[in-house]
Every structure is written in C-alpha cells, then in structure tokens.
Amino acid sequence: CSPNNPSGNIISDDELRRLLELPVLVVLDEAYVEFAQVSGATSHITWAAAYDNLCVLRTFSKLAGLAGLRVGYGAFPAWLVPHMMKIKQPYNVNVAANLAALGALEDTAWLDEHVRLLVLEREQMSAALFDFDFLNPFPSYSNFVLCEVLGRDAGELKKQLQNKHGVLVRHYNKPLLSNYIRISAGRPQDTERLLDALQQVSGSEK
C-alpha cells in the first residue's frame, strides 16, 4: 500500500523500481494516494503502461467516502486482463455503487477541496499529538496518524477514549506493531474533542 495502512508512509520511485525488477507480479494499492498527492507525492498508476508486472489499485472508498459500496478501479498489464475477466463475478459493481461513483466524479473540485482540508487537519492533529508524552506520532501521507503508545497500554487507552469520551481510535497489538493506535483525521471539532479526551485521560491541562 502506498500510502501504507496503518503507517501512512509511501513507497519511493526507486523502491518500486527495485520491486519491478524482480520476477514477480507487483500489486500496488493506492487507496489513500489522493491524500499523499496534496503533500507532493505522485501516483504510480501511469507506470502500469510501462511495466507488464505492475497492477495499481484505486478506490472511491477513501476519496469519496463510498466505502460501503465497494467500488474502485485499477490499471493492469494487458496480458492479465483476460484472466481477470474469467474469474470476475457478474455485476460485481451494483447500480447504486455505479451511480455514486459517477456522481462523485461530477464534482472533482469538491473532492479535491475535501482532501485538502483533511490533510490540513491531519497535520494540525499530528502536531498537537506531540504534546502528549505517552504518544509518539509518525509522519503520515494519508488521512490518519499512527502513534506508538509509550509507558501505558494502548488497548486500555483505546477503551478509556471510547467508553468515557466517545472517541474511537484503532488499536494495534501485533508482533510487528505492538502497542500502537491509529487516529483518523476528521473535522476541526473532531480534533478538538480528541485532544480534550486525551488531556482528560492523561490528567494534563492546557
């Protein structure tokens, strides 16, 4: 994934080229790429025309908020398309999803502005998270921020935020990602509510 979920980092051109030199099919998920483009990163979807072992996936789930409709698209090598069509389910994009995607494309200026505002809010939220000594936020090119939780249990922190303050965060406790939370950017008032909840949980004051 580029940007990656949940880290929010992106793959560089050189890293992708090294992968494409291997005798493997590379599938690059760009579900969050619109948020990265605001920060100067670029999509690699045009690379699919130059490499016969690259597939690039895109979706309307994040950009247009159509996650429940499961609609997206991709760029694939010409040799792969006939094989994909053989296994594709009939009517795999329903009428509602099709209309919603077309509707979203009718106002791309609104989508671009929505993404810009979310990225701005992500940056402001990320900067504010550094004020909490039990959080270590990582740089992100997506619409969320991954934080390492220091000196306390991330699962308990999630429960406190949810049960006492109605704030939802994603908790990770896996071997390669132990004691982390992921926080999605939202509206300015959502960030204010999050920060207020974190202050109360930590016992600190502004």
Image (cartoon, rainbow, N blue to C red):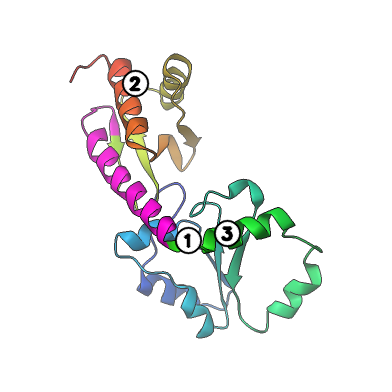
Residue where numbered disc 2 is placed: 197
Residue where numbered disc 1 is placed: 107
Q: Residue 195: x percent and y percent?
A: 30, 27
Q: Residue 47: x percent and y percent?
A: 47, 79
Q: Residue 14: x percent and y percent?
A: 36, 74
Amino acid type of the residue tagged 1 in the rendering:
Asp
Element assignment for label 1: loop
- Which residue is nearer to you in this view: 122 or 5? 122
Amino acid type of the residue tagged 2 in the rendering:
Ala
The answer to whether 29 appears left or right of 81 in the picture is left
- Which residue is nearer to you in this view: 69 or 169? 69
Residue 103's disc number:
3
The quadrant of the rendering that contains the C terminus is top left
Please, is residue 176 above or below residue 161 in the view? below
Q: Residue at x 45, y 46 (%)?
A: 6
Please, is residue 28 above or below residue 117 in the view? below
In whole angstroms, how far apart are the C-alphas of marks 1 and 2?
A: 35 Å
Amino acid type of the residue tagged 3 in the rendering:
Gly
Magenta residues span 109-135
The 10 Å Cα crowd at callout 3, few under 14, some 14 to 19, many 20 or more, is few
Element assignment for label 2: helix
In whole angstroms, how far apart are the C-alphas of marks 1 and 3?
A: 7 Å
